[in-house]
Amino acid sequence: MEISLSRAALFALAIEISIAAAMVAAMERKPEKPREPTRVVMLSFPAPPEPKPAEPPKKVDPPKKVEKPHQKPVRHEQQKPVEKPIPKVEETAPDTKPVADPIPPAPPAPPKPQNSPPAPEVPPSFLGEVRASVQSVVRTPNAAKIAHLTGSTEVAFTYRDRQVSNPSVLVSSNYRMLDEAAIEAVNAANYPAPPKEFAGKTLRFTVWVRFYQADME
């Protein structure tokens, strides 16, 4: 018991000594000087250069539009349906008109006239005499003789009782002077008398007037 009490006393004594030492130390400690305020140094930096305005972008001409050939729109006309006409049914009223009298039969046609007998043909012998009469008086013009022109001209004319009229060229000889000489021969010819059955009748003749090389000698 004595040993434990001494230990407690020693422990208490140690505590008192540490407390006293702390008090002495606190009394001897000098008051600390107040700290100087920290100086704030203002640093001035040069202002940054102003940014240059950006150059506007160069205008780029838009690509020219290639005009396409104007094509007219093709209009497709729609064919309208053909409306079939609806046949109208009309009510026929009973015919109340009086019945006309029957048409009398037409009178019989007059009898057809009998065909007249055909005109007699001109005898070939008489036709040959007429042609010979014209050819006998043919005279070749001097200019045609000098040029040695030959040819034939077909001439038509009207004949009645040894008289002729209205001579004309049907087929030319291609030489005007020969055609004119053929007309002169028709007018100057001495024609034969017609056969009895053609006396006083008008006849139409066509003859060839020929110009030979022998006539030019």
Image (cartoon, rainbow, N blue to C red):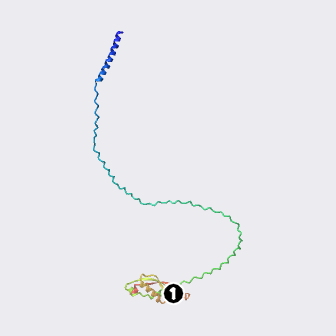
18 on left or right of 123: left
Q: Which of 165 and 73 is in front in this view?
A: 73
Across and down, in percent, residue 60 comes to: 35, 54
Across and down, in percent, residue 149 comes to: 39, 83
Q: Residues within 10 Å of mark 1 (few under 14, many from 20)?
A: many
Q: In which quarter of the image is the C terminus?
A: bottom left
Across and down, in percent, residue 27 comes to: 29, 23
131 on left or right of 86: left
Q: How many callouts does the rendering have?
A: 1
> Up-down: is 92 above or below 2?
below
Identify the residue at horizontal 31%, vertical 21% (top origin): 23
Judged from the image, the secondary structure of the residue bearing numbered disc 1 is: strand
Q: In which quarter of the image is residue 196?
A: bottom right
Across and down, in percent, residue 165 comes to: 50, 87
Q: Can residue 135 be seen in this view?
A: no
126 on left or right of 66: right
> Up-down: is 104 above or below 187?
above
Q: Mark 1 points at which residue?
A: 159
Identify the residue at horizontal 35%, vertical 11% (top origin): 5
Please, what is the three-letter code of the amino acid marked with disc 1?
Tyr
Q: Nearer the viewer, residue 147 or 48?
A: 48
Q: Quadrant of the N terminus?
A: top left
